[in-house]
Amino acid sequence: MESITTDELKKKMFDNEPIHIVDVRENEETAKGIIPGATTIPMNEIPDNLNEFNENDTYYIICAAGVRSANVVNYLKEQNPNIHAVNVEGGMKAWGDEGLEINSI
């Protein structure tokens, strides 16, 4: 499984690379803060939102600690091997609180 550290992902954001971050935490978790520009799709809603993932983009999947996001990356690959999904190692615990937006869901 392909993975990336939070520092590497922050560098991509700082360099203004076009990126797609998908936060798979539950709504009560994301209400405490999300990465600016991230899309929130709770893990249990991924099967109903497969149409959100296309083969032309790379998706950086993040959760609280990296376990759920790894499961989602594996699931997406099983559903469509051409989806480029990358696990964010350590999740939001590794990301920290700096620069997060409050999610108004």
Image (spheres, helix red, strand yellow):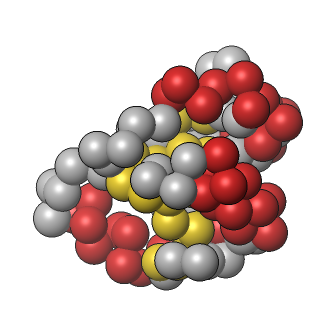
Q: Residue at x 50, y 65 (%)?
A: 86
Picture quarter with the C terminus: top right
40 displayed left or right of 31: left
The tally of labels here is 0
Most foreground residue, 13 or 18: 18
Q: Residue at x 37, y 78 (%)?
A: 8
Q: Position of residue 17 (x, y in %)?
A: 18, 57
Most foreground residue, 52 or 13: 52
87 displayed left or right of 56: right
Residue 8 drawn above or below residue 28: below
Residue 11 drawn above or below residue 101: below
Q: Residue at x 60, y 57 (%)?
A: 77
4 displayed left or right of 75: left
Q: Residue at x 60, y 31 (%)?
A: 50
Picture quarter with the N terminus: bottom right
Residue 3 drawn above or below residue 104: below
- The answer to whether residue 10 is seen in the rendering is yes
Q: Position of residue 29 (x, y in %)?
A: 79, 43
Q: Position of residue 72 (x, y in %)?
A: 71, 54
